[in-house]
Amino acid sequence: MVPLRKLGSQGLQVSAIGLGCMGMSDSYGHADEAESIATLHHALDHGVTLFDTAEIYGPHSNEELLGRALKGRRDEAIIATKFGYQIVDGKYAGMNSRPDHIRKVVDESLRRLQTDHIDLLYQHRIDPAVAIEDVAGTVGDLVREGKVRFFGLSEAGIANIRRAHETFPVSALQSEYSLWERNLEPEIMPLLRELNIGLVPFSPLGRGFLTGEAKRAEEYPEGDYRRSDPRFQGENFDANLRAAQIVQQIAVERGARIAQVAIAWLLHKGDDIVPIPGTKRKTYLQDNIDAALLHLDPDDIARLDEALDPTHVSGPRYGEAYMDMVDR
C-alpha cells in the first residue's frame, strides 16, 4: 500500500504517489477505456487515493471516464480537477477564470464526475485578465458551499501564489518538476515551504523520457504530444539521452526500474511532494506505486542532481505557445 502525505495545512491528506489521468483520454495515442478503468481500479486497490483530471482533458471525456470508474467507490478517492479555459466546440478557445465561469465549470465537472464535491480544485493556468484575488475568493465561496474542499494552483508564479494564498489558503501547487525539469528549485519551492503549500509534480517521468523507453519525436504516432516536444527532437534528444544514463545506472545498482528511480528522487526531495505519474496501463502503474518503497541514499541523490542539473538538459520543456501560458 502507498503511504500517505499531507498537502498544505488545511487537512488534505493523499497517497504519496497519485495518478495522472490525462493520458487515458488525451495527448498520448489511442484511448482504451477498459484498460484505463482497470488501471484506475488497480490504483484504488493498492492504496492510491489522488486522481488528477481536468475539464480540458478530452475535453470533458477524462472527467466522464473518472466518474464512471469511481462509481460505487467515490469515498476511496481524492479527486483533483481544474478550471481556467474557455472550451468552444470541443476545442481550447483561450483563458477564462471569471468567477461566473468558474462556477459554471464546477457544476459541469461535478455532473461529469458523478459526485457532489471536488476534493481539490485547481486553477489550470493563471488568467491575466482576472485578478487572482477574484479567483481565490470564488473558490473560497465554493468551499464554504460544500462543492469544493481544497484550493490549488497550477503553474503559478511567486506573486500570484502569495496573493491567492492571502485571499484563501492554497493547499497545493501543481507544476512540472522532475529530474529533468528543475525550474521550481530556486524560488518557487522555498515559497511553498514558507507558506506550507504542498507540491504536486506532473510529468515526473519527463513525458516518458525518464523511463528508458523514450523514442525520437518522429517515431511517435500522430496525436501523441511528444511529436512536438522540443526535448524529444534532434540534437536535444541525443543530449538528453546521454544525461539520463545516470538514472539507468542507479536503477541497475538498486535492482529497480528506471522510472522508479526518477519517482523516488522526487519523494526524497521532501514529504510535502506528491508526484502524479500518468499511465493508462496496470503494469506501469504498479511500477510507479513500488517506487514509494525504493530507498536512495544521499550519494544517489547527489549523482542524480549533478548529472541532470539544468545545464545538462537540452531544449525547452514546452514550445513557445505553451510556455506563454506558464506564469513565470
Image (cartoon, grey):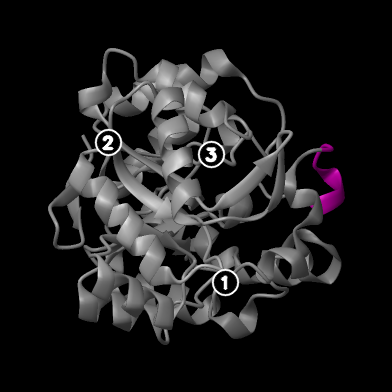
Helix, strand or loop under label 2 = loop
Question: Is any part of residue 116 visible from this angle?
Answer: yes
The reply to whether callout 2 and callout 3 are in contact (CB within 8 Å) is no
Depth check: 303 or 309 in front?
A: 309
Q: Find residue 123 and report its horizontal and vertical position in percent.
A: 45, 56
Helix, strand or loop under label 1 = loop
Which segment is the magenta one?
216-222
Q: Which mark, residue 49? A: 2
Q: Find residue 73 and report its horizontal and vertical position in percent.
A: 26, 18
Q: Looking at the image, which residue is at 23% across and 65% down?
A: 169
> Looking at the image, is mark 1 or mark 3 earlier in the sequence?
3
| Residue holding disc 1 | 128
Q: Find residue 204 and report its horizontal and vertical position in percent.
A: 48, 56
- The vertical placement of 41 against 120, above or below, is above
Relative horizontal placement of residue 127, taking residue 3 as reference (left or right) = right
| Residue holding disc 3 | 55
Relative horizontal placement of residue 142, taking residue 204 as reference (left or right) = left
Relative horizontal placement of residue 67, taking residue 309 as reference (left or right) = left
Question: Is any part of residue 293 visible from this angle?
Answer: no
> Looking at the image, is mark 2 or mark 3 earlier in the sequence?
2
Say which of marks 2 and 3 sits in front. 3
The kind of residue tagged 3 is Glu
> Looking at the image, is mark 1 or mark 2 earlier in the sequence?
2
